[in-house]
């Protein structure tokens, strides 16, 4: 009885301290405790006070009749002071915190002590038992509290729950735990070190139901009574107490914070308890989205709101959904947060991604610089495409214009002339294919796949088409000419300013090359006569056998091409006369002046006899294998004529390859023909047909020899 009175006295005297402590706790809990500030959630029974002295009182705790579940009564004597657990009898235990997760009550409990008189006898003792556990819902938390013993030569211990049926006997606990302190001398103990010298501490077993500590009295205190006259033992929240040597003379009225585990201690496990849901005061986890968890310290169970819910699982609708998106500091989301019942969804905004938006930054799929680069590059590309298309269109339009201007519509109707597209000739018109360069353009050798034939493509450059309107006409005439001694015009390309002409390919090159050029070949009289006769036949055909007389205008060795059998073919008929060298517009005719009829030069009037004159010069070169250059004032030709007309022999002029021939008379005949052709009197010149016939006869005679 005296013990109990003492306890009450302790409680009242420590009240000011506790108030201070609680005020501090209030401040602390206001910003740290999530469970105590469960927002809109219902935390207590309707009509019951939810708070006392700054400590939240959630159901099953409660103040006043009907407000608490059995065993969870809280006493609130003063709204401004700390509340108390209602212990057995009148004992009141100050409470500084009540929580659900973990299910704990933080209380202030007295320490136990015993002191000795100078004869080393106990002359004062208090076991700290306060009977806080009226209905057995509490256990001292073995995870968050431990036992501390102070003194020198002191052994103290705690025991777990009494064995069933045995009450109030220190020796009938299921488990005991304690520790022993020793001091060699007054200076042995060191503040801060609770390692067995002046202070020891030890973990406690579960299932401790009250604040009971026991001292063992068998150890002598004689040597250290002067500096350590008392032993102390107490349960205390882990990490709260730090040893100080001054505490070897501790205030016996001191209380220590202790963590208690509470649970619904109906002697039932969760699975058993769920079956009591229908009973009044039965299954305690009444809220939706709550669940039962077996107690980890003592019998019974506790209730918890499910993940994603918060509040009071012991009240209907006590657990409410957490809007995780409102608490980004607790529920991280680096994307767009969306609350869901019991959880939340976190997704990266459109156009970004993250391996885990809940924990990792969302990254723009296309960072801005890349977007800009792509934009600019794309823009430029599109612009380029448009420009390209525009150019292509212009080119096409131009090609069409040229085609029309060059007589395309007329030539389209002509059967035996092929009109090539610019595209068709692209592969041929390459530098690698150039086989010759003439006065008005380049000649390319090429192969036309469609007709499977080799061709010579003439591409005029640096020239202009003087009589464009006549071009088509000229081409038509040419296309009709089919003769073994005339280079055949296969087709043309009109899609360019100056049409490109496509001829049959003649393999051996020109007479010019063969007589004077790099691939000059030996030629006997027979071969020369053959070449002359066949060339003459080609010219004669053009002069007389076609429906309209076609004049060449530029007969010269370079325009007489030879095939592998040395069969001559005359090229560049007619059309060449339509072309004029661009940089000299005063010159309306093209033609090598070395071979040009002086009469034509004077009158500008081209006749068939002009071609005869030119052919005479070719014959002269064929006999002499010398170039009838114009630059030496027509030296060769004049000397030859002079020699012939004065009756002298012309053999000195003749190429030595044929000079030794037996057919001297033929040479003389030939010389005579040359002189006739070169006659200044146009009328005196023979006709081309005549020349051809005579040359054939000569060739026959040489052959028969
Ligand atoms: C110490 O206490 C014992 C027991 O109460 C008593 O017999 C003894 O006389 C006391 N000694 C002194 C010095 O007070
Ligand atoms: C223990 O105390 C005695 C006397 O008080 C002293 O002589 C001895 O050195 C101490 N031993 C240790 C280990 O401190
Ligand atoms: C120990 O608990 C008391 C009472 O709640 C408190 O005032 C004190 O600050 C705590 N000490 C530590 C170190 O936590
Ligand atoms: C401890 O409490 C008792 C009883 O209330 C009181 O007489 C005593 O002075 C207190 N001691 C201290 C050190 O506060
Ligand atoms: C728990 O079990 C004990 C012993 O079996 C019994 O005395 C007590 O009444 C039971 N408590 C409840 C709430 O059932």
Image (cartoon, rainbow, N blue to C red):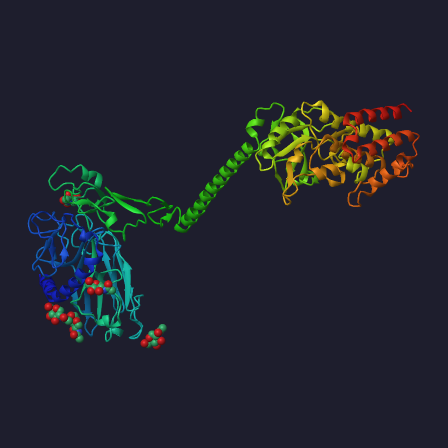
- For the N terminus, the quadrant is bottom left
Does residue 440 show up?
Answer: yes
Q: Residue at the location (58% across, 36% down)?
A: 496
For the residue pair 344 and 442, the one nearer the viewer reads as 442
Q: How many marks?
A: 0
Res. 84 image quadrant = bottom left
For the residue pair 648 and 128, the one nearer the viewer reads as 648
Res. 469 image quadrant = top right
Give above or below for 450 relative to 192. Answer: above
In percent of width and height, residue 223 lies at 27, 74
Give above or below for 138 relative to 596. Answer: below
Is 674 on the left or on the right of 243, as rendered?
A: right
In percent of width and height, residue 162 lies at 19, 51
In percent of width and height, residue 519 lies at 80, 38
In percent of width and height, residue 115 lies at 19, 69
- For the C terminus, the quadrant is top right
Is 409 on the left or on the right of 488, as rendered?
A: left
For the residue pair 169 and 82, the one nearer the viewer reads as 82
Q: Tell me which image quadrant ligand 4 sits in.
A: bottom left
For the residue pair 484 and 330, the one nearer the viewer reads as 484
Give above or below for 372 relative to 443. Answer: below
Does residue 86 show up?
Answer: no
């Amino acid at each position: 009885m005296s013990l109990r009175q003492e306890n009450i006295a302790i409680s009242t005297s420590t009240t000011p301290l506790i108030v201070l402590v609680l005020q501090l706790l209030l401040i602390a809990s206001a910003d740290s405790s999530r469970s105590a500030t469960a927002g809109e959630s219902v935390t207590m029974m309707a009509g019951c006070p939810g708070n006392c002295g700054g400590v939240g009182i959630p159901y099953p705790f409660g103040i006043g009749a009907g407000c608490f579940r059995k065993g969870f009564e809280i006493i609130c004597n003063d709204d401004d002071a700390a509340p108390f657990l209602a212990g057995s009898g009148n004992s009141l235990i100050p409470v500084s915190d009540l929580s659900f997760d973990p299910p704990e009550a933080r209380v202030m409990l007295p320490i136990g002590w015993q002191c000795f008189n100078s004869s080393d006898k106990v002359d004062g003792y208090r076991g700290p038992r306060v009977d806080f556990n009226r209905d057995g819902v509490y256990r001292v938390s073995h995870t968050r509290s431990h036992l501390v013993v102070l003194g020198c030569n002191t052994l103290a211990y705690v025991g777990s729950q009494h064995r069933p049926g045995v009450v109030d006997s220190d020796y009938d606990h299921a488990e005991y735990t304690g520790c022993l302190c020793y001091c060699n001398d007054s200076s042995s103990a060191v503040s801060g070190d609770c390692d067995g010298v002046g202070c020891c501490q030890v973990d406690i077993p579960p299932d401790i139901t009250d604040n009971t500590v026991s001292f063992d009295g068998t150890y002598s205190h004689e040597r250290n009574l002067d500096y350590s006259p008392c032993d102390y033992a107490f349960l205390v929240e882990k990490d709260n107490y730090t040893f100080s040597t001054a505490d070897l003379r501790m205030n016996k009225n001191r209380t220590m914070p202790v963590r208690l585990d509470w649970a619904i201690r109906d002697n039932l496990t969760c699975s058993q308890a769920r079956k009591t849901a229908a009973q009044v005061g039965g299954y305690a986890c009444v809220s939706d989205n709550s669940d039962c968890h077996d107690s980890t310290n003592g019998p019974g169970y506790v209730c918890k709101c499910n993940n994603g819910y918060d509040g009071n699982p012991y009240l209907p609708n006590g657990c409410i959904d957490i809007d995780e998106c409102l608490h980004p500091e607790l529920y991280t989301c680096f994307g767009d947060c969306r609350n869901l019942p019991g959880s939340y969804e976190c997704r990266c905004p459109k156009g970004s991604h993250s391996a885990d938006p809940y924990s990792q930054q969302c990254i723009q799929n296309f960072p801005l610089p890349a977007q800009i680069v792509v934009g600019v590059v794309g823009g430029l590309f599109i612009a380029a495409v448009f420009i390209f298309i525009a150019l292509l269109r212009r080119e096409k339009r131009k090609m069409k214009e040229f085609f029309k201007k060059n007589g395309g519509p007329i030539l389209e109707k002509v059967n035996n002339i092929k009109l090539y597209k610019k595209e068709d000739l692209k592969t041929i018109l390459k530098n690698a294919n150039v086989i010759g360069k003439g006065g008005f353009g380049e000649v390319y050798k090429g192969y036309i796949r469609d007709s499977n034939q080799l061709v010579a493509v003439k591409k005029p450059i640096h020239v202009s088409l003087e009589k464009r309107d006549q071009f088509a006409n000229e081409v038509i005439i040419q296309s009709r000419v089919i003769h073994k001694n005339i280079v055949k015009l296969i087709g043309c390309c009109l899609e360019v300013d100056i049409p490109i002409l496509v001829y049959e390919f003649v393999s051996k090159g020109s007479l010019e090359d063969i007589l004077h050029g790099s691939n000059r070949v030996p030629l006997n009289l027979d071969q020369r006569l053959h070449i002359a006769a066949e060339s003459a036949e080609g010219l004669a055909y053009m002069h007389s056998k076609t429906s309209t007389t076609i004049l060449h205008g530029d007969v010269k060795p370079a325009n007489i091409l030879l095939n592998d059998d040395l069969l001559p073919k005359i090229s560049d008929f007619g059309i060449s006369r339509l072309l004029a060298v661009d940089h000299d517009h005063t010159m309306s005719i093209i033609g090598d002046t070395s071979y040009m009829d002086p009469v034509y030069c004077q009158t500008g009037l081209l006749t068939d006899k002009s071609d005869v004159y030119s052919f005479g010069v070719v014959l002269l070169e064929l006999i002499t294998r010398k170039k009838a250059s114009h630059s030496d004032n027509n030296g060769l030709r004049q000397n030859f004529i002079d020699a012939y007309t004065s009756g002298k022999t012309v053999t000195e002029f003749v190429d030595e390859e044929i000079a030794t021939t037996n057919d001297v008379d033929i040479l003389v005949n030939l010389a005579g023909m040359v002189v006739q052709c070169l006659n200044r009197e146009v009328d005196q010149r023979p006709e081309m047909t005549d020349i051809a016939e005579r040359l054939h006869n000569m060739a026959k005679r040489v052959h028969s020899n």
